[in-house]
Image: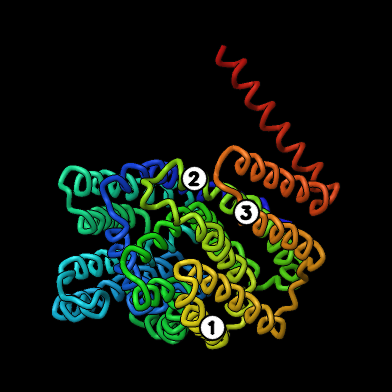
Amino acid sequence: MHLSRLFRGTFIYGLGQFLARAVTFFLLPLYTSYLSPEDYGVFGSLAVLGMMMNGLLTLGFGGSLTRTYWTLEKEEDKGALIWTGFLTLLFNACLWDSFAYLFSDQLSIWLFGVSDYAWPVFLSFFGISLSATLYPLLSYFRIREKAVLSITLYLSEVFVSIGATLFFVVFKGDGALGLVKGALSAQAWAFFITFSVALRQIPLGVHVKYLRELILVGYPFILGLFGYFLLQSSARYILHLYTDLKVVGLFCVGLYFARPVELAVNSFNTAWQPFFSSYLYQQEEAKVLFGKVMSYYLMGMCLLIAPLFTMAKALTYYMLHPAYHQTWSTIGLLGVSQSLWGAYVISAAPFLFHKKSIWQVSVETLAGLVCVGMNFALIPSLGKEGGALATFFGFVAVIVLSIWATRRLLKVQYEVGRLLKMLCGFCVTAIASFIPIDFGLQYLSLMFFVTFLYYAFLWKICLTLDEKTLIISKIRGLVGLQHNLTVTNQ
């Protein structure tokens, strides 16, 4: 059912992001030796600014650009659409950067209660605006399924970020400011290299006539991104109200350990966008196909996230400075929350098919408000664990609301029975990871057994015979290919 194209795109994007994240992940012990939880708290709070401004900096083009692109036939018109969007966002970024510079003191006071962080606030804002401006150019590469090019650009940005962060944090000792400088260095490089490649790859042209549709279709998504901001970042800000920067920092490190899930979700979403858009005029087929995609996506996420519960304590105890050991309790919940955004993106496809952007915005905003309410309810008594739990409830809300709303537009045939089986098994696994046993060999052995048991459950109960046969044949094919390559090299 044409799923191979989606799987191929997801694999390529995922492999590139995995390589990048693997390098940064194994640098965590080094970073946590030079950075305090308070430093991570400052950097995490600055990230809130980026999440909050994302909609205003991209003007909601994430919802309108792809839709408009597929209505055009000539390549020069498609190129003109992309460059028109890019120049519009560049002008928009310059305006917002001017405001950020003028009001950096006030922004620092709003985030931290003092004006001491005005310069890091402006640098963070400037870097965020550079990244937002590139959205139309990167979207063109993704729509044209230039996965290798997109990942090459991404990897170059990551390695510049690693080098710059090591320089400013380890050698210069700049603390939280070093993290900001490292990120800005990478964002500036990404802007330069992506713009240079785009000049050669994308047909040049500008048509003001496209602005109207981009803005009319896109502007509701500005508010929708506000809902996403509430889901992703409200816990950090509300934690700061009730606790201190140390607790915020521990929460942010928990988010860092959930990054493998985030990169998997981002890889899937990047491949999903052009994939589902191609079914705009094949919606009968999409009803069955999208239900299958949801099952496979959630099963893959369950495989990835189960160890974030069962192995979280081991990861933090062996990898991090003792000051960070208590972050383990948030990792699994934050990983689940990140994964649920991908499930929401699948369920939200009918909104874009039928141009119901207001519906989508309403769903995301309402779920964001649910998340905020849960944060205020749980954080005062549960601290960072309350923030993680509230984030989880917010993401559950966005999926439930989306499925309820989109049933009126496209009745996707979700495999409810299979989904309930895999999720019930997952809940048992997650709860088992909180068994109050002292960390040691007994605890590790139990967690390995629980993880293995859940994987066996997925294989035995949640896969059909045909799916098992297909997986086995694919594995045999890969093993055979590797054997042939080895023989050839000899």
90 lies left or right of 85: left
Where is the N terminus found, in terms of image quarters? Answer: bottom right
- In the picture, the disc for residue 370 is 1
Residue 74 percent coordinates (x, y): 47, 68
Name which residue lies at 55% across and 45% down.
439
Q: Amino acid at mark 3?
A: Ser
Q: Amino acid at mark 2?
A: Leu
Q: Mark 2 and mark 3 in contact (Cβ < 8 Å)?
A: no
Q: Mark 3 and mark 1 in contact (Cβ < 8 Å)?
A: no
Element on which disc 2 rests: helix
Name which residue lies at 58% across and 62% down.
336
Element on which disc 3 rests: loop
Is 350 located above or below residue 442 in the figure? below
Q: What residue is shown with label 3?
A: 433
Instruction: Give the CA distance from mark 1 to mark 3.
Output: 27 Å
Its colouring scheme is: rainbow
Q: Nearer the viewer, residue 32 or 138?
A: 32
**Residue farthest right in this picture:** 465
Q: Residues within 10 Å of mark 1 (few under 14, many from 20)?
A: many
Is 359 located above or below residue 447 in the figure? below
Name which residue lies at 13% across and 79% down.
102
Instruction: Give the CA distance from mark 1 to mark 2.
Output: 31 Å
